Amino acid sequence: MIGEISALGCAFCWALSSTLTKSLSGKIEPLSLNFIRCLGAAVPLWAIIPFYPGVYGLSPITGKAVLYLSLSALVGMSVGDTIYIRGLRLINVTLAFPIAQSVTPLLTVVAAFLFLEETITRSFVGGTVLILAGIYLIAIPVGASPLSLDGPQEKRGMGIGLILIATVFWTVSIVFLKFGLKETEPIVANGIRLPVATLALLPLVFLQKSFPEGSQQIKVRLVFLGAITGILAFGLGGILFLKAVQVAGAGKTMVLTSCGPLLGLPISVFLLKEKVTKRTISGTVLVVLGIAFII
């Protein structure tokens, strides 16, 4: 159960990070925020690695593993996340997030079966369907459909297309990640991926204006909060995600981590004062049943 518990722990970290990131929306340019998050997670992680797993944990890493992990970071964190951010400029997050949370697990399950030789059982398929149906009920507002959540048709079509392209990059990234984790500790693997993604984003950050006009004190506060979201999402959440992929498999991990909207409900209720509706309760029941089928 270590893999499954790690996947759900990762989903909680991602949900908490997403909630905190809402406060930064519009205050930091998206690419700069992604850079701050990667750097903010990489620095404390490399401060920990000399103590755990220690120098001996670095010695077994092969050149092939480093290559796979680097490709995973470039394809997923740098390219995939950048395309996703671009898509968010054209459509609302209320449309983008459910698409990403639904399509990525499905593509990963197919890739895990075709390329990673992971076993797909009937209970796993049934649980996946229940979880995705529950996430749809939780993420899509009452009385709305995906096609009614945005404005002009041409922008909506391009935005949805970019989100779908991003899910393909994320899926390829997970396949590379699975290969790279065969002989690597998750914490070390994350220590490789984060600096690679950070360096890839660095040139893009210098080509844009990262912050709106404001005092230096405000900018420092925004950078600090951005780093905290990175530690939650890419640091702690990233290590749990890699552990889950290594132990439970890529397909099961992606389905379980898609439960983020469910795990984010208590945070939204207590911190953002959002109301719990019959729709969210129904979605929660479906997700819990789906998790029971998969685990």
Image: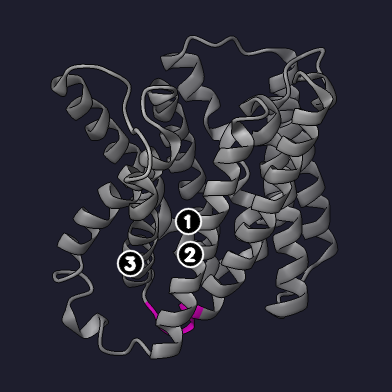
What residue does disc 3 label?
A: 187
The amino acid on which the numbered mark 2 sits, given as a three-letter code, is Leu
Residue 254's place in the image compared with 219, above or below, is below
Residue at image coords 39%, 49%:
204
- Residue 74's tag is 2
Q: Which residue is mark 1?
A: 78
Q: Secondary structure at mark 1?
A: helix
Residue 254 percent across, percent down from the top left: 62, 55
Asked whether 175 or 284 is in front, the reply is 175
Whether tag 2 and tag 1 are in contact, CB under 8 A, the answer is: yes
For residue 214, say whether it is visible: yes
Q: Quadrant of the C terminus?
A: bottom right
Image position of 60 (left or right of 111): left
Q: Is residue 78 left or right of residue 210?
A: right
Above or below 8: residue 22: above
The segment highlighted magenta reads 180-184
The percent position of residue 98, horizontal first and vertical second, equals 70, 35
Examine the structure image and report whether residue 223 is included in the region drawn in magenta: no
User: Disc 2 on helix, strand or loop?
Assistant: helix
